[in-house]
């Protein structure tokens, strides 16, 4: 089959779709991946290695990540989402839509990141099947539990809470997100959260079952496949000799990164990390985002590292300090590492709570309130807890028995 995949966002939104593209390609399908990267990172080289057709549309997105990150500390979740869309999506919506139309024309089936409603519209117009991929299950309605940050008042009240959340999304986002539909002469879906942003045929939940063991109340179009784990770059990565020597000469270090967000606050994050290491009395590997701390340099007890695949290194670490992105959360857990989470936004706070509830992390430490003293205490609490360390090992073993890509391909092929 000829399959088109389209995604938008940062590295955490693109890697899972690249992993899925690789799985489908290896299953004998011809795959084209269209990427809209808000940090303008190119994935052409790895797609060439995997023999996946690649397009970057647009080639450049004019988005001030650093300025946005600094302003986002003062925003509530809806303000944050609106500002992100207004600056990094809506100005390019027509370009993304045109790319979606070409992708639908050229392929038998199309798969989109759950936010790519332009692809859903293009598939509807050409009567082609559209499937979606959701990277976080926080917004999947389930009357057994309340929406995230809502109080649990029982099944009936929870159902009303989900309807309220749907209404809030409609009030805030329906008008701008349905412009394309109206301009195309199509009747838009009635609800943004539960209809516009997912496929009603098949919506893959790219979350390991360890984090969502109960989903019997979900609608049948929502299917858990598991973590879409990209391992191709792992095969091509060799640990630098200096890093190997650093690991061999001391206790297992704490790894520290804020992922793509770190590019937006490079100096602040490095100062926070370095002071916390001193206060916690630990060794550390810090993913550097600052020209003052070049990659593959060392200042005892810290090794600075540049971009690299996380999992081969995580397994040598005692704990991971991170922002709570879905990809880093899964990578840390799969590697058997406890987490110390410093969330910047609500979705990351959701993952922080998931890790805490599973005994894999301590209390979340929100970025807008974090101090080096607080981070150091969070690190020591995890390093000194045998219970958390044992839970991390058990979770790793459980995740290793699941193959999210194979399950996703199986679910998709059942629809072909």
Image (cartoon, rainbow, N blue to C red):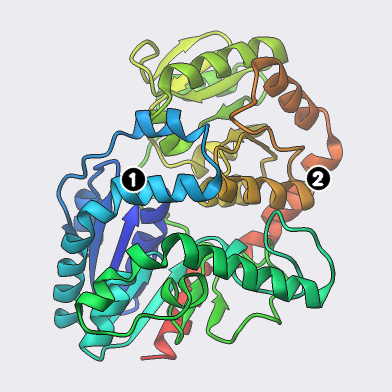
On the image, the x and y values in percent for residue 75 come to 51, 38
On the image, the x and y values in percent for residue 340 come to 67, 34
Above or below residue 147? Residue 271 is: above
The foreground one among 394 and 380 is: 380
161 left or right of 104 in image: right
Q: Quadrant of residue 367?
A: top right
The quarter of the rendered structure image containing the N terminus is: bottom left
Q: Which residue is at 81% across, 45% downward?
A: 390
Tell which circle, 1 or 2, labels the residue nearer the N-terminal end: 1
70 left or right of 212 in image: left
Q: Which residue is at 16% across, 61% downward?
A: 95
365 left or right of 225 in image: right
Of the numbered discs in the image, which one, if any, rests on residue 236? Answer: 1
Of the numbered discs in the image, which one, if any, rests on residue 215? Answer: none
The foreground one among 360 and 312 is: 360
The quarter of the rendered structure image containing the C terminus is: bottom left
Q: Which residue is mark 2?
A: 390
238 left or right of 371 in image: left
For mark 2, give the secondary structure: helix
Q: Which residue is at 46% across, 59% downward?
A: 172
- The label nearer to you, 1 versus 2, is 2
Whole-number angstrom distance, CA of label 1 to CA of label 2: 31 Å
Dot 2: within a 10 Å radius of its alpha carbon, few (fewer than 14), some, or many (20 or more) residues? some
The foreground one among 95 and 90 is: 90
Above or below residue 22? Residue 243 is: above
């Amino acid at each position: 089959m000829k399959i088109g995949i389209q995604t938008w966002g940062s590295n955490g939104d693109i890697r899972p779709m690249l992993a899925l593209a690789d799985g489908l390609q290896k299953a004998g399908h011809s795959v084209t991946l269209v990427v809209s990267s808000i940090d303008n990172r190119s994935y052409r080289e790895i797609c060439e290695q995997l023999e996946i057709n690649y397009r970057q549309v647009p080639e450049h997105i004019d988005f001030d990540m650093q300025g946005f990150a600094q302003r986002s500390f003062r925003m509530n979740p809806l303000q944050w989402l609106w500002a992100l869309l207004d600056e990094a999506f809506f100005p390019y919506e027509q370009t993304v839509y045109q790319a979606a139309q070409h992708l639908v024309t050229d392929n038998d089936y199309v798969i989109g990141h759950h936010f790519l409603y332009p692809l859903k519209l293009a598939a509807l117009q050409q009567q082609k099947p559209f499937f979606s991929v959701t990277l976080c299950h926080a917004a999947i309605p389930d009357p057994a539990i309340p929406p995230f940050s809502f109080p649990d008042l029982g099944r009936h009240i929870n159902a009303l809470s989900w309807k309220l959340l749907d209404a809030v999304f409609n009030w805030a986002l329906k008008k701008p997100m349905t412009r394309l539909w109206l301009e195309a002469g199509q009747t838009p879906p009635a609800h943004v959260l539960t209809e516009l942003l997912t496929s009603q045929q098949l919506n893959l939940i790219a979350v390991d079952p360890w984090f969502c063991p109960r989903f019997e109340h979900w609608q049948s179009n929502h299917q858990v496949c598991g973590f879409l784990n990209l391992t191709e770059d792992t095969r091509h990565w060799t640990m630098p000799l200096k890093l190997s020597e650093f690991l061999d000469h001391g206790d297992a270090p704490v790894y520290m990164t804020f992922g793509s967000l770190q590019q937006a606050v490079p100096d602040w994050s490095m100062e926070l990390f370095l002071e916390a290491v001193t206060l916690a009395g630990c060794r550390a590997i810090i993913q550097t985002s600052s020209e003052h701390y070049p990659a593959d340099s060392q200042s005892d007890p810290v090794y600075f590292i540049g971009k690299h695949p996380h999992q081969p290194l995580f397994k040598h670490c005692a704990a991971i300090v991170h922002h709570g992105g879905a990809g880093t959360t899964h990578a840390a857990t799969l590697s058997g590492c406890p987490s110390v989470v410093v969330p910047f936004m609500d979705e990351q706070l959701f993952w922080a709570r998931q890790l805490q509830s599973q005994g894999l992390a301590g209390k979340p430490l929100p970025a807008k309130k974090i101090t080096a003293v607080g981070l150091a205490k969070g690190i020591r609490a995890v390093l000194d807890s045998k219970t958390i360390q044992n839970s991390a090992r058990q979770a790793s073993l459980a995740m290793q028995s699941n193959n999210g890509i194979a399950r996703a391909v199986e679910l998709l092929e059942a629809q072909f």
